[in-house]
Amino acid sequence: MTSPTLQTAPDRAEEAPAVQLTRLVCSCPDRPGIVAAVSRFLADAGANIVSSSQYSTDPRDGTFFVRIEFTLALSARDQLAERFGLAVADRFEMRWRMWDAERRKRVAVLVSRHDHALMELLWRWRRGTLDADLVLVASNHADLRADVESFGLPFHHVPVRRGEKPAAEAALLELLADRADLVVLARYMQILSGDFLQRLGTPVINIHHSFLPAFEGAGPYERAKERGVKLVGATAHYVTEQLDAGPIIEQDVVRVSHRDDAPALTRLGADVERAVFARAVQWHCEDRVLVHGNTTVVF
């Protein structure tokens, strides 16, 4: 009878290759074979798909959307996006982007005097629950400087003087250049010009204190009170040149009554604004929002 052989562990465990989580989002005219082609490309590249969501507006003649998260060894990532474009995206006429999930998006905040939406982002950022890096706060008023700087963020006062709005927008463009992947308006009470948006070239998200398309523009809570509404809400949307008409990302409401005056509606609405705004920013930074015309698909 032979004795069992004692197998000793190696001096050091074999190290697993470093992997990276990547997000891929695509939209294109719907037709058979899209999922198969994307999956085959990723499999051939050595990727492991860890989550996938898809949607079609109409499988016969609609638009197809997909969001995929996959892991891939760092050593296999060389020219991955370029290869995907040539092998898959061009073939299916895709609008697409690929993003390293470990590279948090840089977010710049514009605000005026109302602090609730801003403070919600600052608090979540400090707590580590916002999948983004806040890089700066700019305001047309100086009121919130101390609050912002207490979080260790730079605060920039860019006043918008009567008749000098182009100069203020030019100053903002210089401040934001190459510093942000997303700009958010945390109750920034200035209308951004189409020229500013075009030259910025970065997505902009606004929180509007109304359940759009009702009560667009200024003073929605006062007008809601005049109409005797039973719900007030908030809308987070992408900013376009047309006021409060960009693609909607997220909305929510709270029930109110005839006893609530305009200040009460404002207080109740502020809580909704904070939550809606934070969710919209988070979803954008997680690449969950795909724009389709004047609407969005949110995975």
Image (cartoon, rainbow, N blue to C red):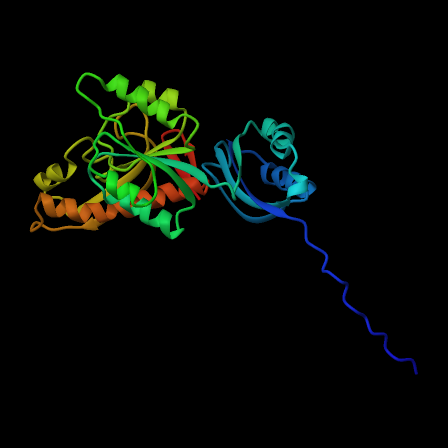
Q: Residue furthest bottom?
A: 1
Q: Is residue 298 left or right of residue 257?
A: right
Between 230 and 127, which is closer to the camera in this rendering? 127
**Picture quadrant where residue 111 is located:** top left
**Picture quadrant where residue 165 is located:** top left
Task: Please say if 294 is above or below 161.
Answer: below
Between 110 and 61, which is closer to the camera in this rendering? 110
Q: How many marks?
A: 0
Q: Residue at x 59, y 45 (%)?
A: 20
Q: Is residue 151 left or right of residue 9?
A: left
**Picture quadrant where residue 294 is located:** top left
Which quarter of the rendered picture does the N terminus lie within?
bottom right
Residue 90: x and y in percent read 60, 26
Residue 161: x and y in percent read 19, 21
On the question of residue 29 being in view, the answer is: no
Residue 57: x and y in percent read 45, 37
Task: Please say if 207 is above or below 82.
Answer: below
Q: Residue at x 7, y 51 (%)?
A: 259
Between 153 and 208, which is closer to the camera in this rendering? 153
Task: Please say if 16 is above or below 45.
Answer: below
On the question of residue 63 being in view, the answer is: yes
Residue 21: x and y in percent read 56, 45
Which quarter of the rendered picture does the C terminus lie within?
top left
Q: Residue furthest right?
A: 1
